[in-house]
Image (spheres, rainbow, N blue to C red):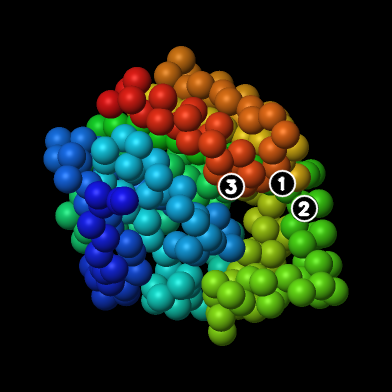
């Protein structure tokens, strides 16, 4: 039985916008960093399934999972999205969310877009980030990224993908799919996307993960991130795994993350 006490929270940012979050307090979490989960481009709190709670239980840590602006119950966004929409999420809003939640030291765990936000956030927040783990983070838009998004657009048009996403996003489904696909496929966005300038400011131990069969990113995404961060970054490729390691190889990824966090906190 879980020992974590969960609170469903609406966090108010300095500009008045609201962020929906689940905040889990572990009885052994005092003095330990909080695990902060940053979701993917089409993500939602519930799409993490039980992984955050299981990792928090394994480590005896508290945990914060939130939906960015435009997602879930958080305040809406308008289109078109800016080309650099991920930058303010890492440089500004991540810190604002942590402040609103009353969270200090953290371990950032980001998937896909959330992984890129974790990179920017780790650079911006300095010593507040004790460690960082990314899954399928993007430093730039590579040919697999763009191919995968174009294929997803076709699937959205011809299959039941809208209905499956609507289980989470309901009336926001079309809006969020457009916010993702139209932004990334916009020439100005994918031609100019480069998050490497933030890497040299990352000082925390960093585990950079990717599935070996990730359909949205080349292996060089991982190696280039590690090169940019330096000696305190570790590359990890997960066998028989695509774009979502924490669900496709859950037990292995759980063990890898837990061992890394124990080693560095």
Q: Using the rendered view, name the quadrant where residue 8 is placed.
A: bottom left
Q: Using the rendered view, name the quadrant where residue 54 is placed.
A: top left
Q: CA distance from mark 3 to mark 1?
A: 16 Å
Residue tagged 2: 148
Q: How many marks?
A: 3
The C terminus sits in image quarter: top left
Secondary structure of residue under mark 3: helix
Please say if the residues under marks 2 and 1 sit with CB atoms less than 8 Å apart. yes
Of residues 140 and 40, the one nearer the viewer is 40
How dense is the environment of label 1, judged by Cα within 10 Å: few (below 14), some, or many (20 and up)?
many
Residue tagged 1: 216
N-terminal of the two: label 3 or label 1? 1
Q: CA distance from mark 2 to mark 1?
A: 5 Å
How dense is the environment of label 2, judged by Cα within 10 Å: few (below 14), some, or many (20 and up)?
some
Please say if the residues under marks 3 and 1 sit with CB atoms less than 8 Å apart. no
In the rendered image, residue 201, in percent from the top left (x then y), is placed at: 39, 30
Q: Residue at x 63, y 27 (%)?
A: 237
Determine whether, in the image, residue 42 is placed left or right of residue 62: right
| Up-down relation of residue 56 to residue 238 (above or below) | below
Q: Residue at x 56, y 23 (%)?
A: 235
Residue tagged 3: 247
Secondary structure of residue under mark 1: loop
Please say if the residues under marks 2 and 3 sit with CB atoms less than 8 Å apart. no
Between label 3 and label 1, give the one nearer the viewer.
Answer: 3
Q: Does any portion of residue 197 appear in the rendered image?
A: no
Between label 2 and label 3, give the one nearer the viewer.
Answer: 3
In the rendered image, residue 197, in percent from the top left (x then y), is placed at: 49, 35
Q: Residue at x 56, y 41 (%)?
A: 250
How dense is the environment of label 3, judged by Cα within 10 Å: few (below 14), some, or many (20 and up)?
some
Determine whether, in the image, residue 168 is placed left or right of residue 217: left
Q: CA distance from mark 2 to mark 3?
A: 19 Å
Determine whether, in the image, residue 122 is placed left or right of residue 163: left
């Amino acid at each position: 039985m879980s020992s974590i006490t969960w609170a469903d929270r609406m966090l108010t940012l300095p500009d008045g916008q609201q962020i929906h979050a689940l905040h889990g307090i572990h009885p052994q979490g005092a003095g330990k960093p909080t695990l902060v989960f940053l979701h993917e481009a089409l993500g939602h709190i519930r799409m993490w399934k039980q992984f955050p709670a299981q990792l928090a239980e394994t480590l005896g840590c508290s945990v914060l999972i939130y939906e960015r602006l435009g997602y879930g119950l958080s305040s809406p966004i308008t289109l078109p999205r800016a080309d650099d929409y991920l930058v303010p999420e890492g440089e500004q809003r991540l810190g604002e969310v942590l402040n609103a939640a009353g969270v200090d030291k953290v371990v950032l765990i980001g998937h896909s877009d959330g992984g890129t936000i974790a990179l920017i956030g780790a650079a911006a927040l300095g010593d507040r980030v004790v460690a960082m783990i990314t899954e399928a983070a993007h430093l730039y838009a590579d040919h697999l990224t763009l191919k995968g998004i174009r294929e997803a657009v076709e699937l959205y048009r011809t299959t039941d993908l809208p209905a499956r996403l609507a289980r989470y996003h309901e009336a926001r489904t079309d809006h969020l799919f457009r916010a993702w696909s139209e932004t990334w496929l916009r020439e100005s966005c994918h031609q100019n996307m480069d998050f490497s300038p933030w890497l040299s400011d990352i000082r925390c131990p960093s585990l950079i993960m990717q599935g070996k069969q990730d359909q949205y990113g080349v292996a060089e995404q991982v190696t280039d991130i590690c090169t940019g961060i330096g000696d305190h970054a570790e590359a990890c490729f997960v066998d028989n795994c695509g774009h979502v390691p924490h669900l496709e190889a859950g037990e292995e990824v759980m063990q890898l993350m837990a061992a890394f966090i124990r080693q560095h906190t």
